[in-house]
Image (tube, rainbow, N blue to C red):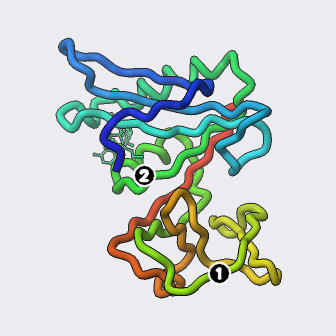
Amino acid sequence: METSKPTFDGRPSIELISIEDGIVVGLIDMVLDTEELKTSFLGDGLGAFLKTIAVHPDYQSKGIGRKLYEAALIELENTPIEFIELYTRGDEQANNFYKKLGFELLTESYDAFGIEKGLRNPITITGIENKRIKALLENGEPCDYILVDGIYEVYDLKALEKIEYDRYYPPRGYFKKIK
Ligand SMILES: CC(C)(COP(=O)(O)OP(=O)(O)OC[C@H]1O[C@@H](n2cnc3c(N)ncnc32)[C@H](O)[C@@H]1OP(=O)(O)O)[C@@H](O)C(=O)NCCC(=O)NCCS
């Protein structure tokens, strides 16, 4: 878990906060694709990657999350961004929130923290199929887990057996076309 707001190293971004009673009660951060550098991959064209949205627990379920999202949408109007993509390990509240805002659940997997039991050859990511990332081994066989930023992204519970993990979460990938 990150304990501070991410920075985007000068990349185009939307970073908004919500203030009530003089204190910050919510934030939303999106990093925007450019022709030179893309973070998103669930859609064609340029996307916005919703990195963080959070509302202080005492202020949740009062419409602040929705307002932050709608304010970000207005900021996106005059950009070439065509869709929003995000991943959440969140609970029912977070998943409901994205569905209510019209996001479509596209990918389901498990994030495992640990180390793989065997060594593998390089893999190639070829796209999305059946709500999961499709990746191939060098011999063309499908790959049931990939390593992303030090975390194993595992596509089914059986493949979890190949990882020596201390914990895992089930992240969901959501997508919404905005133009
Ligand atoms: C997810 C989160 C950002 C939503 O913000 P919020 O201000 O609480 O949400 P809103 O009040 O704007 O609610 C919008 C919709 O979300 C859903 N929602 C909100 N609270 C909910 C709850 N307790 N249970 C189920 N659904 C809920 C509802 O569908 C709601 O629509 P409705 O009001 O028309 O019924 C906020 O709850 C949060 O910060 N959660 C903890 C951090 C987190 O999980 N962030 C996302 C992880 S990637």
The verdict on label 1 being within 8 Å of ligand 1 is no
Q: Is residue 175 above or below residue 48?
A: below
138 relative position to 147: left or right = right
Identity of the residue drawn at 41% across and 73% down: 114
Q: Amino acid at mark 2?
A: Asn
Q: Residue furthest top?
A: 22
Helix, strand or loop at mark 1: loop
- Displayed-image quarter of ligand 1: top left
Q: Which residue is mark 2?
A: 95
Residue 94 horizontal/vertical position (percent)? 38, 48
Identity of the residue drawn at 55% across and 55% down: 173
Residue 147 horizontal/vertical position (percent)? 57, 66
Query: Foreground: 9 or 171?
Result: 9
Q: CA distance from mark 2 to mark 1?
A: 33 Å
Q: Quadrant of residue 45?
A: top right
Residue 143, numbered circle:
none
Query: Foreground: 144 or 104?
Result: 144
**Contact, mark 2 vs mark 1 (Cβ under 8 Å):** no
Q: Earlier in the sequence, mark 2 or mark 1?
A: 2
Q: Which residue is mark 1?
A: 120
Residue 97 horizontal/vertical position (percent)? 42, 44
Instruction: Classify the position of the C terminus by image quarter.
Output: top right
Helix, strand or loop at mark 2: helix
Q: Is residue 109 above or below residue 103?
A: below
Q: Amino acid at mark 1?
A: Arg
Residue 157 horizontal/vertical position (percent)? 48, 81
Give the number of the mark in front: 2 or 1.
1
Identity of the residue drawn at 45% across and 52% down: 88
24 relative position to 58: left or right = right
Identity of the residue drawn at 75% across and 74% down: 136
